[in-house]
Amino acid sequence: MLVLNSYNMSIYRFTDAYFKNKPIRRKINNQNSIRSLLDFPISHSQSIRLGTTIENVMRVYISETSDWKDIKPSNKAGVKERDHLFERSGVKIYAELKSNLDLDTEKKIATRDKAKNIAKEEQVRALILSLRHFSKDMISNSYVKFYNKHNVDVISFQEYFDVLDISCPFNNIDEYKKWLNYMAFKLVEEDSEMGDVDAANVLMSLKNSMNLNTNETDSEMVRG
């Protein structure tokens, strides 16, 4: 039982005053996050890892199924990381991948400046790939205008493959969402195997709702 005395009562009053007077927290619009395309909730850390997983899987897929060569340099201290950097016949493509375009002003400016600076260094067009949006018509003009006026182009998942001049692996948003859900499922499964109780509960719930047999192969899950 918590026993309050005059000392900790004082700090509680300061705590109450802090929350009363602090600026109103900016509301997060999850509809602009890649999480809105998932059929089940994931944690913030899993969401970050999902973005990284998409970035890595796409990099391997593009370099292994086309004549684009992955030239992304190894990460070095003090050097901005390139999310995607490909080269083909002397032409380079650089893209910054984002899972959520609904950023606060500071992060939005930082994203813009990073894309501009890297594009200048690589002498290429500055691209921001919005992973939340499968096609061009789904991206809000307000996001596009902010970056466009600074010579940074915001493109959808589908448009990225048009820029690369290769076939998009998905025909529509439903197929894209199915892939995203599959990767998110694998991340939850990974956390469950590491002893994460919350992830284990989510995994059990998902398997029950999807009527999955734990002995099914991954390929069968994809076809399902």
Image: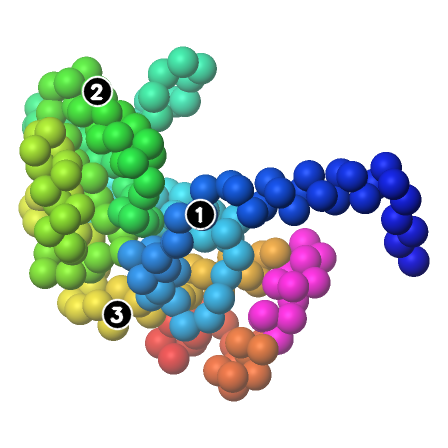
Is residue 51 in view from this perspective?
A: yes
Q: Specify the quadrant that holds the C terminus.
A: bottom left
Q: Position of residue 65 (x, y in %)?
A: 22, 48
Comparing 116 with 74, the one in front is 116
Residue corresponding to mark 3: 175
Q: Earlier in the sequence, mark 1 or mark 2?
A: 1
Which dot marks residue 117?
2
Residue under the image location 33 percent in, 69 percent down: 178
Residue 155 lies left or right of residue 72; in this view the side is left
Q: Amino acid at mark 2?
A: Asn
Q: Is residue 9 magenta?
A: no
Q: Is residue 201 magenta?
A: yes
Dot 1 and dot 3 residues touching (CB under 8 Å): no
Quadrant position of residue 223: bottom left
Residue under the image location 58 percent in, 46 percent down: 19
Q: Amino acid at mark 3?
A: Glu
Q: Position of residue 217 (x, y in %)?
A: 49, 72
Residue under the image location 11 percent in, 29 percent down: 150
Q: Does dot 2 land on a helix, a strand or a loop?
A: helix
Q: Does dot 3 land on a helix, a strand or a loop?
A: helix
Which dot marks residue 24?
1
Q: Earlier in the sequence, mark 1 or mark 3?
A: 1
Q: Position of residue 143 (x, y in %)?
A: 17, 46
Q: Which residues are magenta?
A: 192-204
Q: Residues within 10 Å of mark 3 (few under 14, many from 20)?
A: few
Q: Does dot 1 land on a helix, a strand or a loop?
A: loop
Residue under the image location 51 percent in, 84 percent down: 209
Q: Is residue 7 above or below residue 119?
A: below
* Camera-side mark, 1 or 3: 1
